[in-house]
Image (cartoon, rainbow, N blue to C red):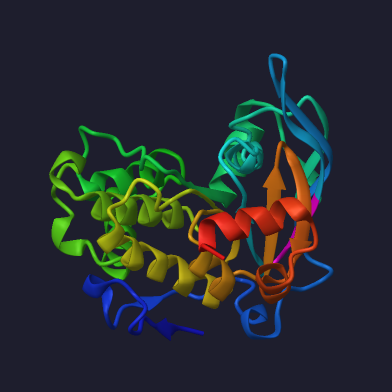
């Protein structure tokens, strides 16, 4: 199943097609309740005396888009970073496809090949072109030939609308272009799960729409996604569920319409009043 980027997509990618993913058939009918892609069970995390994740219990199913929102310092990014081992938890368990997250070594490297992550600050190699940023892991980790890696990378750069910038270094790209390259790099590894940690918060408002359009198309095509975001419109329109965090805890976990129209807890009500001007 291929889809075409429409008016909501990035201006440079109009007419581009995104590949379908293994769970794409679930995109219309919702997530598969038996496909537990990520399971947090009693997860705790401390930074010194600061308790940043408190007894987190959360399941993300295959084909599901879960948006994690909340005030700054609530533990959202830490939650996201524990999924691919960038932050180690102190207690509890996290399972991906039924397997515990490995702590180090080759098993952790294998996990990161199936869990793509897009960061707030792009994290591109500054001395490599856009094309080289995408091909590097394909050659070094996946073992593709340089030509195979280049062909795959160019297809992805075209899909996110920056194929014309393939030979430019990150410093000569706009923030939006750099983030599109970062998304292409993550997708190049053919992940079964994508993590987005405030992927648009470092971008100028006028170019946020294009990056959100790419994320929306991935969601519509069945990619399982855990998205930490402050973009309330995107969360409401695209997510299957909203997870609201504050002070290291999950206070609400609800469908978008329920959360935005009738949040249950007072803290979520205040948060929405502040950010939406209610």
Picture quadrant of residue 153: bottom left
Of all residues shown, which one is farthest toward the front? Answer: 278
* Residue 35, position as x, y percentages in the image: 78, 65
Q: Which residues are magenta?
A: 58-62
Q: Is residue 63 left or right of residue 139?
A: right
Picture quadrant of residue 106: top right
Q: Is residue 8 magenta?
A: no
Location of the C terminus (image quadrant):
bottom right
The answer to whether one can see residue 3 in this image is yes
x 71%, y 33%: residue: 102
Q: Nearer the viewer, residue 266 or 84?
A: 266
Q: Is residue 109 left or right of residue 204?
A: right
Q: Nearer the viewer, residue 257 or 59?
A: 257
* Residue 131, position as x, y percentages in the image: 24, 50
* Residue 163, position as x, y percentages in the image: 20, 63
- Type of secondary structure dominating the magenta stretch: strand
The answer to whether residue 131 is above or below residue 127 is below
Q: Is residue 61 magenta?
A: yes
The answer to whether residue 80 is above or below residue 213 is above
Query: How many tags in the picture?
Result: 0
The answer to whether one can see residue 226 in this image is no
Of all residues shown, which one is farthest toward the top? Answer: 48
The answer to whether residue 68 is above or below residue 232 is above
* Residue 21, position as x, y percentages in the image: 56, 71
x 37%, y 57%: residue: 184
Q: Is residue 10 left or right of residue 260?
A: left
Q: Nearer the viewer, residue 102 or 45?
A: 45
x 23%, y 34%: residue: 126
x 64%, y 73%: residue: 23
């Amino acid at each position: 199943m291929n889809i075409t980027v429409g008016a909501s997509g990035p201006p440079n990618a109009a007419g581009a097609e995104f590949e379908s993913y293994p769970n794409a058939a679930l995109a219309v009918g919702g997530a598969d309740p038996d496909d537990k892609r990520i399971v947090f069970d009693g997860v705790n995390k401390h930074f010194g005396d600061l308790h940043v994740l408190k007894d987190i219990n959360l399941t993300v199913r295959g084909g599901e888009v879960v948006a994690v929102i909340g005030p700054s310092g609530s533990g959202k990014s830490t939650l996201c970073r524990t999924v691919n081992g960038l932050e180690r938890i102190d207690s509890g368990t996290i399972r991906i496809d039924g397997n515990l997250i490995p702590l180090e070594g080759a098993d952790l490297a294998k996990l990161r090949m199936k869990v793509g992550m897009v960061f707030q600050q792009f994290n591109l190699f500054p001395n490599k072109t856009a094309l080289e940023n995408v091909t590097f892991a394909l050659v070094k980790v996946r073992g593709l030939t340089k030509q195979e890696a280049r062909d795959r990378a160019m297809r992805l750069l075209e899909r996110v609308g920056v194929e014309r910038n393939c030979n430019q270094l990150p410093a000569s790209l706009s923030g939006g272009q750099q983030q599109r390259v970062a998304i292409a790099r993550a997708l190049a590894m053919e992940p079964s799960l994508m993590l987005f940690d405030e992927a648009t918060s470092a971008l100028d408002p006028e170019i946020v729409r294009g990056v959100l359009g790419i994320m929306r198309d991935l969601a519509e095509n069945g990619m399982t996604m855990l998205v930490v975001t402050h973009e309330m419109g995107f969360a409401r329109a695209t997510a299957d569920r909203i997870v609201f965090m504050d002070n290291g805890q999950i206070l609400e976990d609800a469908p978008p319409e329920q959360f935005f129209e009738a949040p249950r807890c007072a803290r979520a009500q205040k948060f929405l009043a502040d950010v939406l001007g209610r």
